[in-house]
Amino acid sequence: MLFETNPVNLRDLVTKAWAGEIQLPDFQRPWKWDDERIMSLLATVALGYPLGVMMTLETGGSELQFKARPIEGASIPDGVMPAELLMDGQQRLTSLLQALASEDPVDTKDARGMKLLRWYYVDMARVLNPDADMKDAIVSVPTDRKALDASGKRVDLSTREAEFAAGMFPLRVVYDSPARGRWRRGYENSDDSHPDIWERFEATVLNNIDIYQIPVIRLDKATPKEAVCIVFEYVNTKGVQLTTFELLTATYAANREYSTEHGEDFHLPAEWAALKDRLARHNAVSEIDDTDFLRAVCLVSTHFRRRGRPGTDAFTQPAASCKRSDILDLELSEYRRWAPDIESGLEWSARFLDRQGIFNARDVPYRTQISSLAAIRTVLGAETDSPEAEGKIARWYWCGVLGEQYSGSLDSRLPRDLEQVAEWVRGGREPASVTEASFNAARLDTMTTRNSAAYKGVYALVLMQGCYDWIFYSEPIDAAFCVDQEADVGLIFPKDWCVKNHIEASRRDSIVNKTILASRTRRIMGNSAPSDYLARLQTEVGLPTNWIDDTVSTHLIEPAHLHANDFDKFYLARSAALLTLIEEAMGKRAVSSEAAPETIEDYEPEQPE
């Protein structure tokens, strides 16, 4: 067994946290409980009720070496190494440590999120009232220790004598035996003492706190990294789930070889932030996230480390891998070796996507596919620069997009694509992603929003084949035009016209009835019939009708159908034209609508654009 569960006395947990024997892994995100939750927690302990399980991880394992930091409120000298890391229970133990053992007020907030510093007391008389709620007996006071109690009575607890007079026991001394003894003697010797109250209070509330135990799951130091990540995701449900990036951040920060050589820890978030700033200059890859980047690094690292091993083959058992366990095993030296090359691969990917008619991150069909693309470039290098190589990579790319292959599990898809595309470029056989891809002609009728990768892919193909705006016609629509003229996708037969003419919503909203145009062009078109807005566009540009028609036709639209306001003929002809474009990109025939019929009802409803 990699774990054991034992009850641990709360006093021991607080003592160990205070001494630094229990600390937090650096990937734990700081977050504080509000004042109300802390009072409820203290009431739970005072009543002896359970507050749930905590989890720790034994340190000292060869695989699990995380940078640690003290639990907030604990004052630990530099260099103290923890025996255990707190994996689950951060907020509860932090709150209890600060409320029951710290000489400083608890750093918390109110329900609105306003920052507070609070001391916590127990109203001894109220807690012994059988009709009173324990939570009402827990009193939170500001740093000057002057506040209203639960009944609305003003109390001044700024001196020990004032505490005696109010019968308010300070919870900060509950585990400090000398201080607790002095407080008891002072109370018993004061004019405001009630011996019977103290004895009952000590026998019930303080005794509950003294003997309070918490079940603690203790993970063995031999626990694999992947198991730690999974455990954190499924057990730490009240916090924010741990990501692979955060776990690697803690692992890399604990790398002593790097720290010794450079005089500081390796800070992965800072490295990633700087890289993201550089990638922001390349619009199509500007929204790559940390996991996408780590996947690409891991793909290349494993590809080169495992090549030539017995049993590895591009088509049966790829050398490359990007499973979470492999990413978690990615050594810092390997990350530093390949990260710059992957960054260069992403810059190349942005230029490649631009040549495919994909100019910005919003229009990237599958962000995750870029991990494969950057890895392919890194493995092949300049071999991708020949027209033949780019043609093969483009065909693989469009088969993935239009075949909608990157919607499922990536653990097998990405490594297989890297290995097989690289082999194909070098003269090997066609990748499975190409041979297995298919496009159903009926799918055109069901693509209505950017939620569909194929939808984004179709209008990128229209841009790639060279289309012109209907009033800004001097150059084909490109990345600069899209920015300068706020170009976006709009309806060719406008919504109001379609509603008046009883065009069903699925065909009206389909990608077939959409194209990309400048914002000014779309405004001129408005909600008019196509014949009307074409006349206005002709007046706007002052050119003959056939010139306007020529620019319209660059969008694979038959102008005569717009002049005649004939939606059915328009839809049929443009569907056929788009299908030809798709078949050319994929290098194969589409499946006919008769062979594989589809309707919008076959898909989960998409969110509107």
Image (cartoon, grey):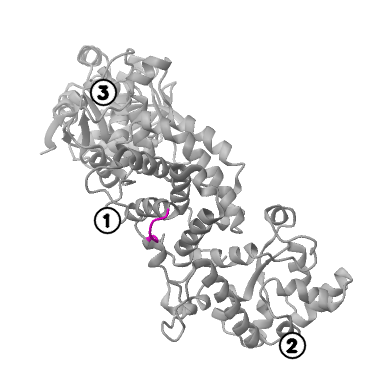
Quadrant including the N terminus: top left
Q: Nearer the viewer, residue 444 or 94?
A: 444
Viewer-nearest of discs 2 and 3: 2
> Could you tell which of marks 2 and 3 lies nearer the N-terminus?
3
Tell me where residue 554 appears, x and y as whole percent: 70, 71
The image quadrant that residue 39 belongs to is: top left
Q: SS for tag 1?
A: loop
> Could you tell which of marks 1 and 2 lies nearer the N-terminus?
1
3D distance between C-alphas at marks 2 and 3: 79 Å
Quadrant including the C terminus: bottom right
Q: Label 3 sits on what residue type?
A: Ala
Say which residue label 1 marks: 316
Identity of the residue drawn at 26% across and 18% down: 81
Q: Name the side, left or right, on which 256 lies relative to 482.
A: left
Say which residue label 3 marks: 17
Boundaries of the magenta span: 427-431
Residue 429 inside the magenta-drawn segment? yes
Q: Vertical placement of 405 versus 61: above or below?
A: below
- The answer to whether residue 91 shows anywhere in this view is yes
Q: Report crowding for label 3: few under 14, some 14 to 19, many 20 or more residues within 10 A (C-alpha).
A: many
Identity of the residue drawn at 29% across and 21% down: 172
Q: Label 1 sits on what residue type?
A: Thr
User: Chief secondary structure of the magenta span?
Assistant: loop
Q: Label 2 sits on what residue type?
A: Ala
- The answer to whether residue 28 shows anywhere in this view is no
Tell me where residue 310 appears, x and y as whole percent: 22, 45
The image quadrant that residue 170 belongs to is: top left
